């Protein structure tokens, strides 16, 4: 794995690549990431699995979204569940920082709502058979996608 230099460090979001809600969230973040701060990797990719393990979590547990700040730098830090979502919104800047202010509340309270949505996400938003492949215009934002064994992807 090549490490980005400090000037190339981005915020990396790890998400369930087959979850309809997660893919809609990623598409939303890409559309609104005007400063090109965010990068993405599916939890199913080798990169996603390795990072989750590195930070002491179960790589087979796909109901948690992670945000890795200062990815591959000595100052790398991980946020998960609701704190990850609100951090990612804050990275968008502008009015998206307003809902991100909710991250001041205790994680256990915010995660109650997060966990409820996580439990019903496949039933409500659907599930893909494989991780969708990013479009050519956004492919540079996805890390580790070539390491996932499933290449029968739909285009985002």
Image (spheres, grey):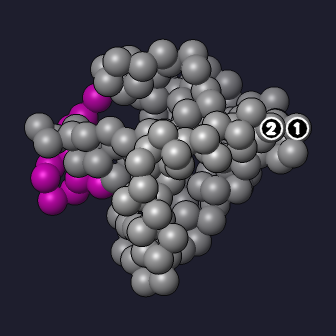
> Which region is colored magenta?
1-10
Crowd around label 2: few <14 · some 14–19 · many ≥20 (10 Å): few
Helix, strand or loop: magenta stretch: loop
Label 1: how many Cα within 10 Å (few below 14, some 14–19, many 20+): few
Instruction: Check if mark 2's residue and mark 1's residue have beta carbons within 8 Å.
Output: yes
Q: Position of residue 104 (x, y in %)?
A: 37, 59
Residue sitting at 55 percent across and 64 percent down?
29
Q: Is residue 58 above or below residue 4?
A: above
User: Do we see residue 99 in this rendering?
Assistant: yes
Determine which residue is flagged by label 1.
123
Query: Where in the figure is residue 135, as x and y percent of width and height?
Result: 64, 57
As for residue 100 lying within the magenta part, the answer is: no
Left or right side of 153 for 31: left
Residue closer to the observer: 85 or 138:
85
Relative horizontal placement of residue 72, taking residue 100 as reference (left or right):
left
The tag on residue 5 is none
Q: Which residue is mark 2?
A: 120
Q: Could you say where residue 87 lies in the image, as x and y percent from the top left? A: 40, 58
């Amino acid at each position: 794995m090549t490490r980005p230099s400090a000037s190339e460090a981005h915020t990396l979001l790890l998400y369930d690549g087959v979850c309809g809600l997660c893919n809609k969230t990623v598409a939303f973040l890409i559309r609104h990431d005007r400063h090109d701060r965010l990068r993405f990797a599916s939890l199913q990719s080798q990169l996603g699995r390795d990072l989750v393990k590195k930070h002491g979590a179960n790589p087979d547990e796909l109901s948690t979204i992670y945000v890795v700040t200062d990815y591959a730098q000595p100052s790398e830090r991980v946020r998960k569940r609701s704190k990850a979502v609100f951090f990612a919104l804050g990275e968008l800047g502008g009015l998206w920082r307003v809902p991100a202010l909710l991250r001041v509340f205790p994680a256990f309270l915010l995660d109650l709502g997060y966990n409820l949505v996580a439990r019903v996400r496949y039933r409500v938003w659907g599930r893909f058979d494989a991780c969708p492949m990013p479009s050519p215009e956004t492919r540079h934002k996805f890390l580790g996608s070539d390491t996932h064994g499933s290449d029968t992807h739909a285009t985002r």
